[in-house]
Amino acid sequence: MTISWTAYRRARRRSRQAWAVLIVLAVGLVSALAWFFTAGQFAAAEPTVTGPSEAPVLDPSWMKAVPPVRPVLEGSAAAALETLAVKGRAANDNYERTAFGQAWLDVDRNGCDTRNDILRRDLSGAQFTEGSRCRVAAGQFHEPYTGAVVTFTRGAESSKAVQIDHVVALGDAWQKGAQQLTPQQRQSLANDPLNLVAADGPANQEKSASDAAGWLPKNKAFRCHYVARQISVKAAYALWVTPAEKDAMKRVLASCPQQQTVIPR
């Protein structure tokens, strides 16, 4: 059977088109598998958790804002992220918690230490120990990191169930600019309500000194606020981010482009 030149070219063109389609499908399959075996399998394995989408910052009726190194500008969290310096981590072999002052001082001078201020701010129905207007004895709250309803009861062991987390961990801050702050400024950073949330004890321990590239709350509804709050703290205290940290923050904020910076008020 004789095949015309026109028919031959047509068949060849169709063959090339078929191969092109197969190549596109193969590339898509390889990309999908690569995604799954890196981030995808972990995203798919994450349990669906619902919880609060933000946490309180300041109750001006009894709390006072802590003066930062520089004011946090109101506006887009993504835009604020672009103003942060991007560098590698500094050494942390000389880090000590005492570099940020005594834990839980009364920095805002309202008569109560910072830990009890944050418990009172974040817990519903906070109860105080007898004879005290500061020392929180019990309360309950919808915990932001896990989305669980957590009960706080003061006690030698039970108090560990609710801890006060530094949104920007002090160990992380030390490696990203806090060494250049004055002792007074580091003390403010450690006690600023903007940088503090009451959190589930085990979740706080799991986070440790991780930044956004290493740890995010299981409660996905809280992640945009969490990242915006970290950006706001870093802007307020002239701290920087690493390239990996910035990329992680941008990925979170891509799902909430309207997310604003977090302002103490």
Image: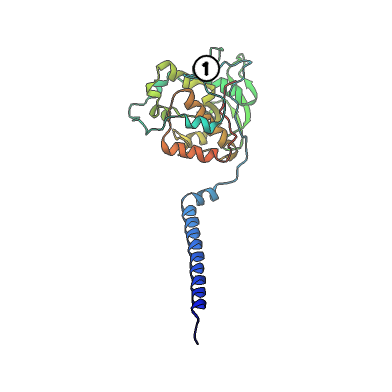
- Secondary structure state at the residue bearing disc 1: loop
Q: How many marks?
A: 1
Residue 193, x across and y down, in percent: 54, 22
Closer to us: 51 or 262: 262
From what the image shows, is residue 97 above or below residue 42? above
Which residue: 60% across, 42% down? 49
Res. 242 image quadrant: top left
Name the residue at the right extreme.
125
Residue 25, x across and y down, in percent: 51, 62
Say left or right for 28 vs 183: right
Q: Is residue 19 visible?
A: yes
Closer to us: 22 or 241: 22
Q: Is residue 161 visible?
A: no
From what the image shows, is residue 19 above or below residue 200? below
From what the image shows, is residue 16 above or below residue 135? below
Res. 214 image quadrant: top left
Name the residue at the bottom extreme.
1
Q: Amino acid at mark 1?
A: Val
Where does label 1 land, which residue? 66
Residue 136, x across and y down, in percent: 59, 21
Crowding near pointer 1: few (<14 within 10 Å), some, many (20+)?
A: some
Q: Quadrant of the C terminus?
A: top right
Residue 134, x across and y down, in percent: 58, 16
Q: Tell me how the rendering is colored.
A: rainbow
Name the residue at the front extreme.
5
Which residue: 48% across, 34% down? 205
